[in-house]
Amino acid sequence: MVKNFLIGSHKLGVDPCYIIAEVGSNHDGDKSRAFKIIQHAAKAGADAVKFQLFRADRIAARIDIPEARLNDQFAKFGKTVYDLYKGMELPDAWLEELKSCCDENRVDFLATPFDEESADKLAEAGVPAIKVASFEITHIPFLKHVGKLGLPVILSTGMADLEEIETAVNAVVSSGEDRMALLHCGIEYPAPLDSVNLRCLETLRTSFDCPVGYSDHTEGIVVPIAAVAKGAVLFEKHVTLRNGKSPDHDFAMDMEDFAKMVNAMRQCESALGSNIKKVQDSEKKHLLRGRRSIFVVKNVMEGEIFTTENLAVLRPGIGLPPALYEEVLGEKASHKINAPAVLKEGDWR
């Protein structure tokens, strides 16, 4: 697969970490609220704002069985997962306006489709990439369809092992798309820290030789910073406004904290620097003051032998380097030297 590719104007693995503000259903069915989230996310420093596009009829069976019923956390949104999705649908008519709002605020417009028709509509709307959710990683027909759209694919890998990920990747690549990024993630909200397993970023990177990132469901900003430090080149975080009623609201980050998170991640990137060990510009002013050189510490007459009694290695480093100290010991002074003095070339014969 391609190691570095563009999403919009952003080159993964070359430019800073691509930060996606995931709206999910936190628009609450209110288009003006969706616009406001885009504006706040852009101001906070997001590179992209992402929504979800699906139709309940194409994502869940309309059936009432134990496996389809909502748990206590989501019971207020209906009885079954079908009911939940039905109440979260984003109107197709919004797509053009959401894209325009993102363009005006200089962030990429992204969305996660959950069926082929939704994927096609997003491609027509001008998204720069297709994001595939963890739940769809075994939906091979859907992945093959996505691979034919001519757009980079970002694939979340929650609940999947390496064999399932490889099967999903092959489905996309065999359909013609080799620009893929993988997002390590879990699916619990909030995710316990001991389940995060950020070392898997390197596992995915070496296993699939592609850009790797993290989709975060934890609380706070510790894991986002750690993800950047571990080499995540793209990152996704659920966001919301302070007041909301959607199923996604309770585990999403408000905009004030999101801005702090983005800033902390950028500071981490700055601290990471390059892998080149060199004297930093900020260090150069300390070189002479902090390093040592050879000093004459007792008066020396012409012809007198330099010894550990009359020579010492001291700060500042304005003279001969300490590496010459043992070479000079035993040599004779070429002239009289009054201490303290910096030893110079020509002071011995």
Image (cartoon, rainbow, N blue to C red):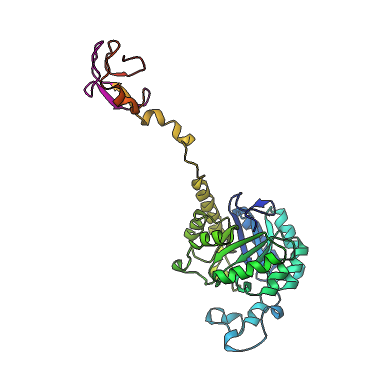
- Compared with residue 29, is residue 283 higher up or lower down, i.e. above or below? above
Q: Residue at x 32, y 19 (%)?
A: 343
Q: Position of residue 226 (x, y in %)?
A: 48, 57
* Quarter occupied by residue 164: bottom right
Q: Is 306 part of what is drawn in magenta?
A: yes
Q: Which residues are magenta?
A: 296-319
Give the farthest residue toward the left. 309
Q: Is residue 181 left or right of residue 104?
A: left
In the foreground, 304 or 20: 304
* Quarter occupied by residue 5: bottom right
Q: Position of residue 253 (x, y in %)?
A: 55, 63
Q: Is residue 114 left or right of residue 206?
A: right
Main secondary structure along the magenta-highlighted residues: loop
In the picture, the quarter occupied by the C terminus is top left
Give the farthest residue toward the bottom. 65
Number of marks in the image?
0
In the picture, the quarter occupied by the N terminus is bottom right
